[in-house]
């Protein structure tokens, strides 16, 4: 299905009920949620998007302002005539969810923030950030490489020690299909973006999910974020790296549904 406007956006959707939107990370696309849609759509109207410049969504001219993702997300919620939506974002998807809440708090029912951060610098520190970018931006910009050239190394750097070959293949595949120019624009916009949401100001229920072996966003980071957030829960997912929903789909789905069913039954 497509959401009109510019750029037009591709979404997968299943189910009926309260609107739940799944937001992929910087190297992902909507297919990253294939293990979630069947479970989540039993009780929710579940929508997984391709962000602008990703997957089957359109590319766009000019540089990216990170807040463009939030304006796009508003279009999606309006398209489905929903007053508000539950947002579930992984990594950069969680950064988009926070940014959206800062801009449009009244349109958010709850937040599931998985393997994410308030802003990149705070999460990674200078050395790790430099390393992250040198694995991605440098080859694409300076060495004329394509996303598929960096896919294996980038996937390996994100997955936990118990990830299977299938997990690696799924992640490497989503990285290798990135739109090169849009991916570069996203890295250039998302990484320095530093208007973080004041977590203390969040007035909807929030769930923080972090993988035990996440090399990018360790559980400690999530604990600190949850401590600052009023109505929040924190859960560490055992035997997972950064891509919790792919590496440990059963534990991820169970945690999210438990939280959302709680929130929707009391809210």
Image (tube, rainbow, N blue to C red):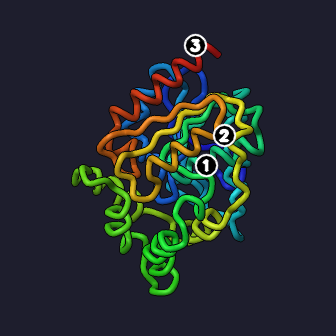
Tell me what residue is drawn at x 50 percent, y 55 percent: 55
For the question of whether residue 81 can be seen, the reply is no
Is the residue 68 above or below the residue 227 in the image? below
- Pick whichever, 111 or 54, lies toward us: 111
How far apart, in angstroms, are the residues tagged by discs 1 and 3? 31 Å
**Vertical relation: 134 (above or below) 92:** below
Residue located 26% across and 51% down the image = 163
Q: Residues within 10 Å of mark 3 (few under 14, many from 20)?
A: few
The x, y position of residue 97, in whole percent, is 63, 44
Q: Are marks 1 and 2 in contact (CB under 8 Å)?
A: yes
SS assignment at label 2: helix
List the residue tagged with mark 1: 9
* Residue of label 2: 76
Where residue 78 sits, quadrant-wise, is top right
Image-quadrant location for residue 226: top right
Q: How many marks?
A: 3
Of mark 3 and mark 2, the one earlier in the sequence is: 2
At 60% from the left and 28% from the top, the residue drawn is 19
Q: Which quadrant: the C terminus?
A: top right
Answer with left or right where residue 153 lies relative to residue 130.
Answer: left
Secondary structure found at label 3: helix
For residue 57, the mark is none
Question: Of callouts 1 and 2, which one flags the residue occurring earlier in the amino acid sequence?
Answer: 1
Give the image location of residue 187, x and y in percent. 57, 67
Give the camera-side residue of 83 and 124: 124
Disc 1 versus disc 3: nearer the observer: 3
Residue at (49, 29) in percent of width and height = 14
Provide the residue designation for mark 3.
265
**Residue pushed farthest bottom?**
143
Residue 78 in view (yes/no): yes
Q: Where is residue 46 shown, x and y percent of the image? A: 52, 31
């Amino acid at each position: 299905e497509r959401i009109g406007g510019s750029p037009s956006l591709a979404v997968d959707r299943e189910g009926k009920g309260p609107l739940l939107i799944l937001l992929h990370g910087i190297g992902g696309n909507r297919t990253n949620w294939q293990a979630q849609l069947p479970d989540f759509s039993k009780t929710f109207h579940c929508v997984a998007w391709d962000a602008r410049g990703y997957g089957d969504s359109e590319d766009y001219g000019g540089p990216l302002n990170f807040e463009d993702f939030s304006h796009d997300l508003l279009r999606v919620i309006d398209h489905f005539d929903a007053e508000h939506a539950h947002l579930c974002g992984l990594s950069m998807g969680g950064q988009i969810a926070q940014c959206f809440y800062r801009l449009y708090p009244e349109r958010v029912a709850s937040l599931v923030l998985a393997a994410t951060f308030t802003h990149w610098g705070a999460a990674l520190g200078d050395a790790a950030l430099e390393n992250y970018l040198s694995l991605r931006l440098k080859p694409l910009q300076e060495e004329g490489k394509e996303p598929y050239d960096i896919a294996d190394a980038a996937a390996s750097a994100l997955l936990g020690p118990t990830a299977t070959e299938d997990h690696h293949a799924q992640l490497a595949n989503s990285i290798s299909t990135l739109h090169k120019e849009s991916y570069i624009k996203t890295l250039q916009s998302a990484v320095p973006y530093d208007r973080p949401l004041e977590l203390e100001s969040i007035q909807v229920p929030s769930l923080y999910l972090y993988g035990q072996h996440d090399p990018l966003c360790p559980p400690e980071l999530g604990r600190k974020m949850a401590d600052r957030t009023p109505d929040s829960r924190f859960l560490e997912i055992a035997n997972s790296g950064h891509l919790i929903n792919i590496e440990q789909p059963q534990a991820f789905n169970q945690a999210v549904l438990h939280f959302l069913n709680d929130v929707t039954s009391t809210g």
